[in-house]
Image (cartoon, helix red, strand yellow):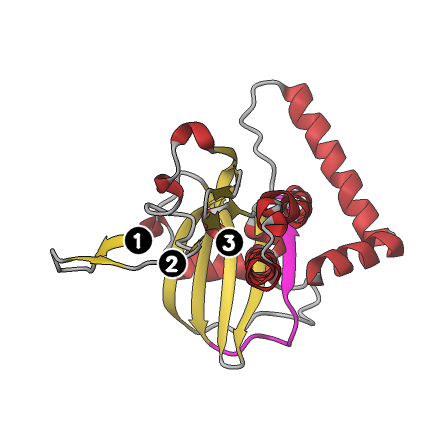
Amino acid sequence: IKFRRRNSNKEELIECDFIAGCDGGASKCCRHSIPKDEIRTIRKSYPYSWLSILVDSRPNGHEVVYSFDKTDGFALQSLRSPIKSRYHLQVSVDDKLEDWPDERIWSQLNKRLTLKDKSWKLNEGAIIHRALFPTRTSMTIPMQYKRLFLVGDAAHIVPPTAAKGLNVAVKDARILAEAIIDVYDNNTFDKLDNYTDKCLIHISEAVEFATYMTSLLHKLDLSNENNEINEFDEILQRARQHQFQHSSALQRHIAQMFVS
């Protein structure tokens, strides 16, 4: 690998047997080192974004809390530490951070997350970080070129609703590590050659689950001029939500998928 350090013009060289490309979804190095005719990326974008905030307050309870509001959409309390909370809001894909002052953020979080009987409500606090990011998914195929192997977000983006990004990346890394060990221990490249196919099993399962959770919990995009399509999608979403509320088998399946 030839490279230059930041603020330096000196070219350096590292010799290695294999390269693990772990430079993330905005990869400008590893993925772009692969010839365009040797790789392709499948993408799906959703018509909304997430507004994510980090708050200087304790989370209420020790569980992740999901919410769906049929008027305003999705909200989430996720866990970061015993003294910091992370919240997410579904917002318009055209929104900017300046469209969301503190007052509006807390108003919407309270509306979407607080139970009607007030038995559960969020803990407000100082917002110490905020960010907007689009809701999207992508899969880069194949995840390897010669002795370069893409790992984690450099190869795939999973919709954040199911909190699968880190899980999937760790599984990629484990499969790659086992394949490289096999090369040195047994002088065979079979596992390395099969790296993409082996990873695509858990990646596609995670993407399918995250896509399901996203469609279940987000306000639908009703900008389509075909009202029949809008009504059809709404009917399907209500059916899925009803199944989720009343089917213990489906609840167990979702719980298993969430922690796997």
User: Which residue is denoted by mark 2 in the rendering?
Assistant: 16
Q: Nearer the viewer, mark 1 or mark 3?
A: 1
> Secondary structure beneath disc 1?
loop
Q: Which residue is mark 1?
A: 1
Residue interval drawn in magenta: 57-71
**Label 3's element?**
helix
Q: Which residue is mark 3?
A: 152
Q: Say whether residue 61 is magenta.
A: yes
Picture layout, residue 118 above or below residue 157: below
The x, y position of residue 170, in whole percent, is 57, 61
Which of the two discs, 3 and 2, labels the residue nearer the N terminus? 2
Q: Is residue 28 left or right of residue 142?
A: left
Magenta stretch prevailing secondary structure: loop
Q: Alpha-carbon distance for marks 1 and 3?
A: 20 Å
At label 2, counting other C-alpha atoms closer than 10 Å, the crowd grade (few under 14, some 14-19, many 20 or more) is few
Instruction: Calculate the distance from the C-alpha at mark 3 to the C-alpha at mark 2.
Output: 20 Å
Residue at position x 62%, y 51% in the image: 191
Q: Is residue 217 left or right of residue 108?
A: right
Point out the tag, 2 or 1, that comes first from the N-terminus: 1
Closer to the camera in the image, 5 or 195: 195
Residue 233 on the magenta span: no
Q: Are marks 2 and 1 in contact (CB under 8 Å)?
A: yes
Q: Amino acid at mark 2?
A: Cys
244 or 123, which is in the foreground?
244
Q: Is residue 50 visible?
A: no
Q: Residue at x 72, y 38 (%)?
A: 237
Q: Residue at x 46, y 42 (%)?
A: 146
